[in-house]
């Protein structure tokens, strides 16, 4: 921390091992690599965490450099509102936006939701993710989590009907949502959606690649289809109305909580259902996202549950219930 009244910005890369491995259609990883931004003024420090995502051309090193490049602007008193125009949406802006909100809340002696005039978040049921694998492996992993009320199933293309059938047999009582991570094709889209409908899946997330999802507007969708990679911030919402029924809001895509809240308001106005999602990260990433949960039909903030260990003062998880952050963590 600094005793100066001039704001100071620091940032660093942090790594957290994943419990086992996390596998989706684009590959597997064994650790969560995050970038943390800290803005200090007087005796106060605000923090924010982001996860650079290679799908969007982001790397930890480039994200760190982008945050560090804002040191002079922060020292001159960069505000959260000015930040929206000073940096493009993405992971780097997310970390800095959340750090500025945390600092602003501490300086005002308010919780972040009061500062931002948003509803007080309560405890919510979060999805718990089952990684992509063989039907047998996914069924075994699902059986261990079958007591959880909401499971998010990672699928990946060929053999997905068999995977989702095996998962449903292993968790007959859980609500299932599916994330195909852009791995389906126009040729297998309707077959895979029908297989999901047959076992009672509630929602399918991003079945087709972003930019190649026009087929969703030409078919009768038998269940809720949610945009993830096809949606980033408010500017991408209006064009999705014919193809999607819901949108997955992630702070690393929107570029922070400021835009995420505005996007949630706009999405509701356009009639979309809302999922609040996350990358695999610590509770410091999840904490700001909790402010979006009052507007969300689906909450997918299980990142810390997938880690071998979370950071200090992490969110409270009571099985699948996740609770708002303590001020010792964020906001």
Image (cartoon, rainbow, N blue to C red):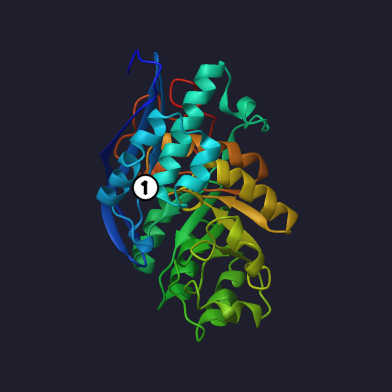
* Residue 186 position within the rendered picture, expressed as x and y whole percent measured from the top left: 52, 84
Tell me if I can see residue 320 in this picture: no
Vertical arrangement, residue 108 with respect to residue 192, above or below: above
* Residue topped by disc 1: 51
> In the picture shown, does residue 49 fall above or below 263?
above
Q: Observer-nearest residue: 14 or 245?
A: 14
User: On screen, 324 above or below 200?
Assistant: above
Residue in view at x 41 percent, y 40 percent: 95
Measured from the top left, where is residue 303 in percent x and y? 41, 44
- Circle 1 residues within 10 Å: few <14, some 14–19, many ≥20: many
Quadrant in which residue 239 is drawn: bottom right
Instruction: Give the residue displayed 43% in from the left and 67% down from the top.
Output: 155
Quarter holding the N terminus is top left
Instruction: Kindly tell me whether residue 110 is visible in this rendering.
Output: yes
Give SS at disc 1. Answer: loop
- The residue nearer to you, when weighing 1 against 192, is 1
Residue 269 is situated, as x and y percent measured from the top left of the image, at 74, 54
Q: Residue at x 33, y 46 (%)?
A: 66
Q: Please say if 2 is above or below 23.
A: above
Residue 250 at what x, y percent from top left?
A: 50, 50
Judge by depth and name the residue closer to the eye, 216 or 241: 241
Nearest to the observer: residue 191 or residue 242: 242
């Amino acid at each position: 921390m600094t005793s100066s009244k001039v704001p100071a910005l620091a940032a660093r890369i942090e790594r957290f091992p994943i419990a086992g491995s996390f596998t989706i259609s684009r590959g597997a990883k064994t650790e969560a690599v995050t970038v943390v931004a800290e803005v200090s003024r007087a005796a106060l420090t605000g923090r924010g965490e982001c996860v650079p995502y290679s799908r969007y051309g982001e790397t930890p090193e480039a994200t760190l450099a982008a945050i560090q490049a804002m040191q002079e602007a922060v020292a001159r008193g960069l505000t959260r509102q000015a930040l929206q125009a000073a940096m493009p949406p993405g992971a780097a802006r997310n970390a800095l936006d959340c750090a500025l909100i945390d600092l602003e809340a501490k300086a005002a002696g308010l919780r972040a939701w009061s500062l931002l005039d948003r509803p007080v978040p309560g405890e919510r049921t979060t999805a718990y993710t089952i990684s992509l694998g063989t039907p047998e492996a996914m069924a075994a992993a699902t059986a261990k989590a079958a007591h959880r009320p909401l499971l998010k199933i990672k699928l990946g293309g060929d053999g997905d009907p068999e995977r989702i059938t095996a998962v449903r047999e292993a968790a007959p009582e859980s609500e299932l949502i599916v994330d195909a991570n852009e791995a389906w094709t126009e040729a297998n889209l309707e077959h895979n959606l029908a297989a999901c409908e047959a076992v009672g899946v509630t929602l399918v997330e991003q079945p087709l690649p972003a930019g190649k999802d026009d087929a969703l507007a030409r078919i009768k969708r038998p269940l809720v289809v949610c945009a993830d990679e096809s949606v980033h911030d408010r500017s991408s919402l209006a064009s999705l109305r014919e193809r999607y029924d819901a949108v997955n809001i992630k702070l690393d895509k929107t570029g922070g909580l400021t835009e995420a809240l505005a996007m949630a308001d706009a999405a509701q106005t356009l009639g979309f259902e809302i999922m609040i999602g996350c990358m695999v990260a610590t509770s410091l990433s999840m904490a700001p996202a909790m402010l979006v949960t009052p507007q969300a039909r689906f909450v997918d903030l299980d990142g810390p549950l997938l880690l071998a260990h979370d950071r200090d003062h992490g969110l409270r998880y009571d099985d699948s219930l996740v609770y708002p952050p303590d001020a010792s963590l964020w906001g």
